Every structure is written in C-alpha cells, then in structure tokens.
Image: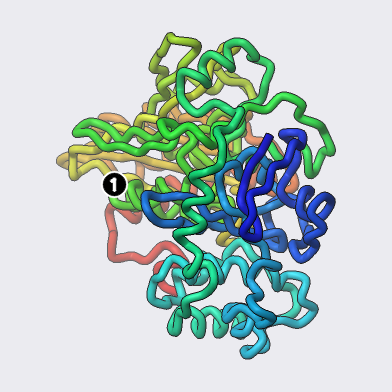
Amino acid sequence: MTQFLMNGRIQTENLPDDTTILQYLRRDAGRCGTKEGCASGDCGACTVVLAEKEGDRLKYTTVNACLTFMPAIHGKQLITVEDLKHRGELHHVQQAMADNHASQCGFCTPGFVMSLFALEKQQQAFSVEHTQHALSGNLCRCTGYRPIMAAAQAVCEAPQADQFDADAQQTLEKLRAISATDQPVSMDELAARYLAEPDARLVAGGTDLALEVTQRYQRLPKLISLSHIPELKMITLTGQAIHIGAAAPLSDCMPVLHDEFPEFGELLERFASQQIRNQGTFGGNIANGSPIGDGGPVLLALGASLLLRCGAAQRELPLDEFFLGYRKTALQPGEFIEQIRIPRVTSEARQLRVYKVSKRLEDDISAVCAALQIEVRDGVVVHARIAFGGMAEVVKRATHCEAQLLGQPWQTATLERACQALEKDFTPITDFRASREYRMQVAKNLLRRCHIELTSPETLMRVTHYV
C-alpha cells in the first residue's frame, strides 16, 4: 500500500510494487499531462516533482515518472503539471514559457515546466550554468533552447510566491499524518526481510532496474524499496574516509565529492541528468555490476571499499574484489551494500584525473571512462591506481599499466611503456558505441593526456576549459 499527497488530498493506492508513477498517472489517475517519450529517462517528457519533508520545510526534486516505482513516493507529495494552474490562471512558470514563445508542438513542455518549477523552488539566483544542469534531462526537438532559457531567466530573476508556498505548513502536516509504509524503515528491518526473501530485488533509485519494466516489459513481482531507510541515505566524513550510504542520491553526494575530489564532482555533472541524479545511487551503480557504470572506475582509482551486510553480520570488502564477471558480483544471497567508503587523500602530491568519452557531453553513456590517481615525488611515480569502464566485461583496474609506472620516472618513455601495457590489461569489444580499436586507442590517449595535464598544467586539454 502506498500513501502520498496529490492535489491536496492523501491518496491510498494498492498497486503492484513495479508500477511506475507514469503508469499510475496516465492509466489509473487520468492525468495525461505527463507524457511518455523514451521510457528510459533520457527525454524528460515525463518529469514530475516530488516534495518531501526536510526538517521544517519542503524539499522539491524532479524525477522521471517513467523510472520511479510507486513505493518511492510513499509519504511524499506528487506534483504534476495539472497541479500548477491556480484559480483558473496559469502558474507563473507556465506563463513565462508562453510569454517567451518557449513551446511549439508542446509535447516536451510539461516536463520543462516541471523542471523550471523545481528550479525556482531552489531559490537560487539565475545562472546559465545552473539552469543548463537543471534542464539537462529535458529534450526539445522543435522549439530550440534559447526561448526556454529566456523563460527560465524570467522565472528565476523574478520569483513569485504560489499556492504551494501558501499551503506549505498544511502540506507538512498532511505528510506527517501519513501512516508507516509496509517497506523497511530501518537497517535491521531491511536485513531481516532481505535475508528471508533473498530472491527479492532491492530498489533505491531504480533508474537502471526500472528499464526491465519499461524497455523489456518484464514484471518484478518482489521488490524491497530502500527509499525509507535514513541510515542508507547518510553521508558522513571522518578524518580517514567519506562514508556514503548506498541509497544516498547522487545529487546529495555531488557537493561533498566536488569539495574533496573536484574531478569526481565534474564527472557527476555529466552523469545522466538532474532527474536521474536525484534518484540514482552509488549503491545501485555498483551493485548492478555494469561494465559501463561511471562511478566504478573512479571509486576503484580512489581505493574505495564496501561495507556489506547479511542479517546481523557485516564485512568490509575492497571494491577491487567485488566485480567477478559481467553483471556478477561478490554479493551473497541476502547480502546488500550498506555503505561506500572512500579514503580521504592526505598527500597534496596525489592527483586524480577523470575522463569520460561519450558521443555527447551530457546525459550519455560512456564509450570509455578512465580514472587515474597518480602521485609523483622527485620526478618518480610513487603511487598509481588506474581504472577503466567500457574496456572489459567489468569495471577494472589496469594493473599491468600501473606496474609499468610505479617506481619509474614520470616521463614520455615511461608513459609509452604503460600505454602498451594496457593491451595486456584489456581486450575491449566492439559494440554500437565504439569499436574495440577505438576504445584501446582512446584509453592510451587518455593516459597520455593525464601526463600532459600533470606536467604542463597551463595547456588546456579539455573542450570544457576553453569553450
């Protein structure tokens, strides 16, 4: 049973756990303003906003309705484009879209409106960069983005109070009145339930798992939602490590990681879209065992480990030992990822470089993703951890390449030997993203790029640095 707030009323729905918000809206609620485009989280036509309690205020986030299962909205307010009109008048976000001629065919418009609505609720001054990130998961094929950006500027530069602001305290009271979910709400409950039902599928953001429903038309009869376990969403820093709960949304992880590892933060800005980052998690990115997950290479290069739990037992496992084969991991039946632990870097000489090669800058899957952590002292490499995604059946360290670097002078001859060693580390495949020859050449070139960036920092090597 799922209880949530919609149109000012508490809704109680008893639907299969693998029902998506989009299916519910269009099929059961008769709310067809939310569109279905790609059914994979790429186009943003299905964007809705969830409001949830954050202390004594409401936090508004965008999600893809096509990829979000109904249990994830228990105890939250679901806001769709139909909710914005007030007393017969357009919401000022909708009016800005109309005034700036930011809609032609209109199919994508509800999704853009909802992203702009959430953007305004963040109460930040208008900036092109921030707005582009907020809209990176919304695609338009006919209007063009200039008038949409103009609408965003009009909204952010002159924010207006609306019915949601006026009703905020009532909304909080109604959300507090919603009864407990039948999904686990503590780590102990989760451990006990998953041990009893090890064939169930765990779902946090569900941005990858939901594709089995929307793209492969499969049913997921047993789901255990992680959305209501606070411990799994915690992010804490100690003197030695960053501890990230397995269900912490990527958008919550970004500020911490950007401060600690700017290169990691920049990669996450290119990690899918805002809607996906609001739902997706490192726990899911790792547990699905995908060879093209962008989180894995960086975490491997940083020497991350996983805190795993099965019942009452816990164990810590280096990430190096977690990936066993294509979509195969070291997780035992009933065992789940509780936390990701990333060692903090204490040496200023230790440098991280992260490179993502894809067919477009944002909201795309990598052909090759490389992460290199290098430390050079007195011209000699004293530390090297190098990992790649998209080069093998798993995300994997380049151990032969590392061996060619360690203890050697940080110079071109050493780099060329390390480049050749990559052919011992990887045998990439050809698929629709890239050929095996291209992948190998790119991997070598990224190693060369890292050397140039670290030895000649004045040389601009990335398009984002000069465009």
Q: Nearer the viewer, residue 353 or 160?
A: 160
Q: Residue at x 61, y 78 (%)?
A: 91
Q: Whole-percent x and y of residue 452?
A: 35, 54
Relative horizontal placement of residue 208, taking residue 317 as reference (left or right): right
**As rendered, which of 209 and 411 lies closer to the eye?**
209
* x 75%, y 40%: residue: 19
Q: Which residue is mark 1?
A: 260
Which image quarter holds the N terminus?
Answer: top right
Residue neighbourhood size for the residue with mark 1, other residues' Cα within 10 Å, grouped as few (<14), some (14–19), many (≥20): some
Q: Residue 111 occupies which quadrant of the picture?
A: bottom right
Left or right of 282 in this view: 435: right
Q: Could you tell me which secondary element the residue under label 1 belongs to?
A: helix
Which residue does the image show at 68% across and 41% down from the upper left? 69
Left or right: residue 151 versus residue 309 is right
Q: Residue at x 66, y 67 (%)?
A: 83
Residue 62: percent from left, percent from top: 57, 58
Residue 434 in sight here: no
Left or right of 441, for residue 232: left
Most foreground residue, 233 or 401: 233
As rendered, which of 389 and 144 lies closer to the eye? 144
- For badge 1, the amino acid type reads Glu
Give how far across and how far down residue 221 sits, in percent.
76, 26
Q: Is residue 124 visible?
A: yes
